[in-house]
Amino acid sequence: MKLSGQYRSAIDWARAIREGEASCVEVVQTHINHIEQVNPALNAVVHFNPEAALKQARIADIAVAKGRDLGALHGVPITLKDSIDTEDMVSTWGTAGRRETVPEEDATVVKRLRAAGAIVLGKTNTPELTIGGAMDNDVYGPTRHPWNQSLCPGFSSGGSAAIVAAGGSPLDFGSDTGGSIREPAHFCGIAGIKPSAGLVPRTGHAVPYGLGPIDSLTQIGPMARCVEDLAMALTLVAGPDWRDPAILPTPIGDMAAVEISGLRIAWYTDGGLAMPVDVIANAIKTASNELTKAGAHTHEAAPRALPRATELVPALCYADGGAWLERLLMNAGTEGGGRHIRRVLENARRGITAEPMRIYEAVDQFRSDMISFMRDFDAILCPTEAGLAHPPAPPGESSLPRDWTYAANDWAHMAAYNLTGWPAVTVPAGVSENLPFGIQVVARPWRDDVALAIAAFIEERMGGFVPPPG
């Protein structure tokens, strides 16, 4: 997808630097200027270090002048969700106990992005520990939507989505435990992928590896204005780091090599969960029709197990009464947690069970039933979420329902695929009521290339990213 001006893709910015169309300093300064223009209204970039970024850009320009081999992101400015550690800037994870914490080393994904030449401009806002239930925290306050500042940009990677959509950064990396990359991408009209579980190391992330039965829920993935950038960025950060024990040496296929013709694609609008608003349902049907025209075999079908995700995700997360979350707070040095996460902990303590093994067995049966459905399909086309961007929770409240039954209208369309661990992409699909929205493409495990290829096809046929007004 070809984007222009401030909204160019990361790949295009990198090409401009390699071909001498722009210097690294010019590209970085352009993004610094734009962040300074748009961020006061958004509060998306919460730690900003323009001086260090310009210093790195000058060094990057020397490498270009000397004809050195350049990485895929050489000189390209990016931002990162504040749940991801950076050794040269504050990484709060949105929690008060880390208000001034500068980690001793970069997260694995950051090391790999810097090795590819990326220049980190700053960190983007997240709820406390990414789990606070509102796009707000006690360190930096709330982040606002780039199309309508009275609305929430989605959580927990809402800061990432807001600044990418606003043109302040061509690429950000978020994290997704129950939809936290895909919901903000959907709300803000950008693209984002939750990769296959076991693909991208979580070393140096607020919600780390090693959380037992809930370990596979959380993945780190890229967020950008076009699908091509997602595919490029994912290849840079995937693969074992010999610290995260869940990561497998599984290569990512090339999305350009995927033939749409012949793919078997299931599609549904509700799947037994919440029926999406008409514009989302119609976009799914339109995308299915376009895929059919291109030779794909599309069928209206949904896994019968899908509605069980509504109960299984909170049951799994709350099986120990939130003790795992209390340990994360303790490790961060935050006593009790902020107002939003305290609400989550209240729900967790009500959800504790004396028979966690029954929950684990039910989750495994869900995964078995879901993968059995995929025997006949290569991918699924479905809602990211049932509605468009909505207002934030009232002060002191959480966007989660009090009993956290995972109201399908919020997250179950996404959270089901955290349970399975399959790759899932949100791709822009249109604008309605002056708000952008996306739809979701899910593929078999380890076929991130298939999900990305279908998403790129939809992006091309349905228009893709639209800049916010003004």
Image: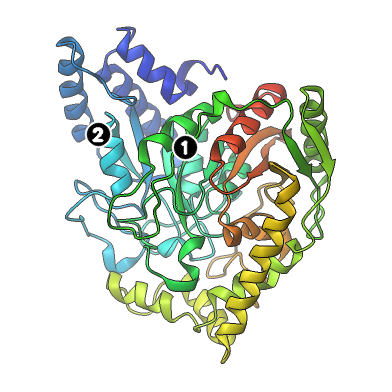
Q: Which mark is residue 243?
A: none
Q: Quadrant of the N terminus?
A: top right
Label 1 packing within 10 angstroms: few (<14), some (14-19), many (20+): some
The picture places residue 229, in percent across and down from the top left corner, at: 47, 29
| Residue type pointed to by label 2 | Ala
Q: Which residue is pictured at 72% across the width and 50% down the height? A: 375
The picture places residue 36, in percent across and down from the top left corner, at: 36, 33
Cβ atoms under marks 1 and 2 closer than 8 Å: no
Side of 94 relative to 303 (left or right) = left
Label 2 packing within 10 angstroms: few (<14), some (14-19), many (20+): some
Q: Is residue 150 visible?
A: no
Front residue (pair 339, 299): 299
Q: Which residue is pictured at 75% across the width and 39% down the height? A: 265
Seen in the picture, residue 463 relative to 50 is either above or below; the reply is above
Side of 45 relative to 252 (left or right) = left
Mark closest to the chain's N terminus, 1 or 2: 2
The picture places residue 112, in percent across and down from the top left corner, at: 29, 39
Q: Which residue is mark 2?
A: 115
Q: Quadrant of the C terminus?
A: top right
Q: Which mark is residue 252?
A: 1
Front residue (pair 251, 236): 251
Q: CA distance from mark 1 to mark 2?
A: 19 Å
Q: Which residue is pictured at 69% across the width and 42% down the height? A: 379
Side of 281 relative to 69 (left or right) = right
| Residue type pointed to by label 1 | Ile
